[in-house]
Amino acid sequence: MKRMGLLFTIISMMFITMSCGDSKTGDAKTPESGSAGTTSSPCDAFMTEYEQFADSYVALLQEAKSNPTDMSVLTKSADMLKQAGDMTTRAKDCEGDAAMLPRLLKVQEKLQNAMQ
């Protein structure tokens, strides 16, 4: 279970870091005015994928809690860590996107609640 906690911490830190924006330029993307959420941006697609990833991670945590001796959980967690690394690389395109922050915070809250 300690490994799962470490994995969660690593994943959380990667996504918290990506949400901070570009501090060198102070660039923060803002949502376009008049947009009613009907358009889909690459950041929207990324956040949808991140939300699905978080759901999978919560399911993995529940699986680990219900059967802590199941070695397949470690294999799955290694796969998820690789996926998290790939997503972190892709997330750089969305750094500083203010529209992404509320969704990111909801996902982080879901992950934190799953760890309790």
Image: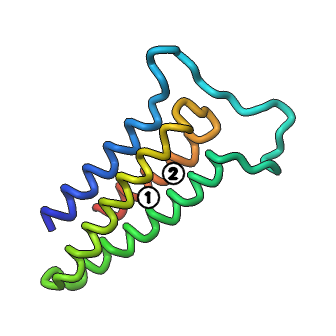
Q: Which residue is mark 1?
A: 110
At horizontal 38% and vertical 68% (from top left) the residue drawn is: 58
At horizontal 57% and vertical 48% (from top left) the residue drawn is: 103
Relative to 34, is 23 on the left or the right?
left
Q: In terms of secondary structure, where does tag 2 sit?
A: helix
At horizontal 52% and vertical 33% (from top left) the residue drawn is: 95
> For the residue carrying disc 1, how many other residues have a C-alpha within 10 Å: few (<14), some (14-19), or many (20+)?
some
The x and y percentages for residue 21 are 49, 28
Q: Which residue is mark 2?
A: 106
Q: Is residue 68 above or below residue 40?
A: below
Q: In terms of secondary structure, where does tag 1 sit?
A: helix
CA gap between label 2 and label 1 equals: 6 Å
Q: Is residue 116 above or below residue 27?
A: below
Relative to 72, is 112 on the left or the right?
right
Relative to 84, is 46 on the left or the right?
right
Of residues 98 and 42, the one drawn nearer to the viewer in this rendering: 42
At horizontal 43% and vertical 45% (from top left) the residue drawn is: 89
The x and y percentages for residue 94 are 56, 38
